[in-house]
């Protein structure tokens, strides 16, 4: 069997956010994924290996290095590779560009939730964090909420200004509190260890999308934000005991597991009860999502090749 090598530019040009959200929902209708994560830490640096097997869909292994200080020398903070294997034979089917899978998995995870939890009339979207993920979130949200106006906040304001340049529907802000209060959707992609969003700032009807925290010592929102919100996750298995956003407040009895209303395996429960409800989604981005997204990318890739012959 020929192995497909899918580069970022070639794959990125073929994909669609609505189709991806549908593929993620369909993937969760299959039997539950077997997932194993391995983390190795060296101070601020992380080696993350994630593997997943979904019966009928296949196997994926994703290895990533996360070196936050790479930005000092203009090297990407996150690097790695994704391998996709056949469910029937275990044969390697494709090697996919890590950043391609990560972009569409990370933002696609959030979009899958936002299309169900955010108010359909949401117009004002705040992106907190102007890094690589922040740019991906802009691509995803601007496609799925096409009439939206965006603000971007970043600790280094110049990065927010840079992200806004050339985009008619994006402006940079240096006042996080005001931006949070005025937003319909707040999407956070930072590497904060201490909460950056204050629950006193939240307004009725908002949707909060949390992406950045991935370690047990990381959080983006405070306790009050959690207590004021209806909380959803992409996976109970990869968020509650692994990511500080929920692990810390659960351990401290700020919230209980009963307060986490559903994960994607109960996707039909992803809905708001009223226009005034504050919904919150924790994007944990487990390996099962890498598998679903890699399979979607390969399927689109093959369809495109067949249409050219």
Image (cartoon, rainbow, N blue to C red):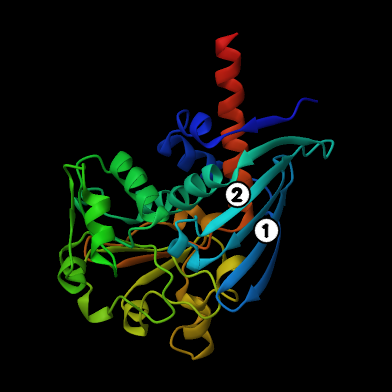
In which image quadrant can residue 58 be found? top right
Instruction: Look at the picture and state if 131 lies above or below 244.
Output: above
Task: Using a 10 Å C-alpha cutoff, classify the residue at mark 2 as few (fewer than 14 neighbours), some (14 to 19) or many (20 or more).
Answer: many
Q: Please provide percent x and percent y for residue 202.
A: 23, 73
Q: Label 2's element?
A: helix
Q: Please provide percent x and percent y for residue 215.
A: 55, 74
- Image quadrant holding the N terminus, namely top right
Decide if residue 148 is in sight here. yes
Instruction: Look at the picture and state if 69 lies above or below 90.
Output: below
**How many dots with numbers?**
2
Tell me which residue sits at (52%, 29%) in the image. 10
Q: Please provide percent x and percent y for residue 308.
A: 56, 11
Label for residue 202? none
Q: Label 1's element?
A: strand
Horizontal side of residue 220 vs 70, given as left or right: left
Label for residue 50? 1
Tell me which residue sits at (37%, 78%) in the image. 226
Horizontal side of residue 90 vs 196, given as left or right: right
- Image quadrant holding the C terminus, namely top right
In which image quadrant can residue 125 be found? bottom left
Q: Which residue is mark 2?
A: 290
Nearest to N terminus: mark 1 or mark 2:
1
Decide if residue 126 is in sight here. no
Tell me which residue sits at (63%, 76%) in the image. 42
Residue nearest the observer in this picture, 51 or 35: 51
Question: Is the Cβ of the residue at disc 1 closer than 8 Å to that at disc 2?
Answer: yes
């Amino acid at each position: 069997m020929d192995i497909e090598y899918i580069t970022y530019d070639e794959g990125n040009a073929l994909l669609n956010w609505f189709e991806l959200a549908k593929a993620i929902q369909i993937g969760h209708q299959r039997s539950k994924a077997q997932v194993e994560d391995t983390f190795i830490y060296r101070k601020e640096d992380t080696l993350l290996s994630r593997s997943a097997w979904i019966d009928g869909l296949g196997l994926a292994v994703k290895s990533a290095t996360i070196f936050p200080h790479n930005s000092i020398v203009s090297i990407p903070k996150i690097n790695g590779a994704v391998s996709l294997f056949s469910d029937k034979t275990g044969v390697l089917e494709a090697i996919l560009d890590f950043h391609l899978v990560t972009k569409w998995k990370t933002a696609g995870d959030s979009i899958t939730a936002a299309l169900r939890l955010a108010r359909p009339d949401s117009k004002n979207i705040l992106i907190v964090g102007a890094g690589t993920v922040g740019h991906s979130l802009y691509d995803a949200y601007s496609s799925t909420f096409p009439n939206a106006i965006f603000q971007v906040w970043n600790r280094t304001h110049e990065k927010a200004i840079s992200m806004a340049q050339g985009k008619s529907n994006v402006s940079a802000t240096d006042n996080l509190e005001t931006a949070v209060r005025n937003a319909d959707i707040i999407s956070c992609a930072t590497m904060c260890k201490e909460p950056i969003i204050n629950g006193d700032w939240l307004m009725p009807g908002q949707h909060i999308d949390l992406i950045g925290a991935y370690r047990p010592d990381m959080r983006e929102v405070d306790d009050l934000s959690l207590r004021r919100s209806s909380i959803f996750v992409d996976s109970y298995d990869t968020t509650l005991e692994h990511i500080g956003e929920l692990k810390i407040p659960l351990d401290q009895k700020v919230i209980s597991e009963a307060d986490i209303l559903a994960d994607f395996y109960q996707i039909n429960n992803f809905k708001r009860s009223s226009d005034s409800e504050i919904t919150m989604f924790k994007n944990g981005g487990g390996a099962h999502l890498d598998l679903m997204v890699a399979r979607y990318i390969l399927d689109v890739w093959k369809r495109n090749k067949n249409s050219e012959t």
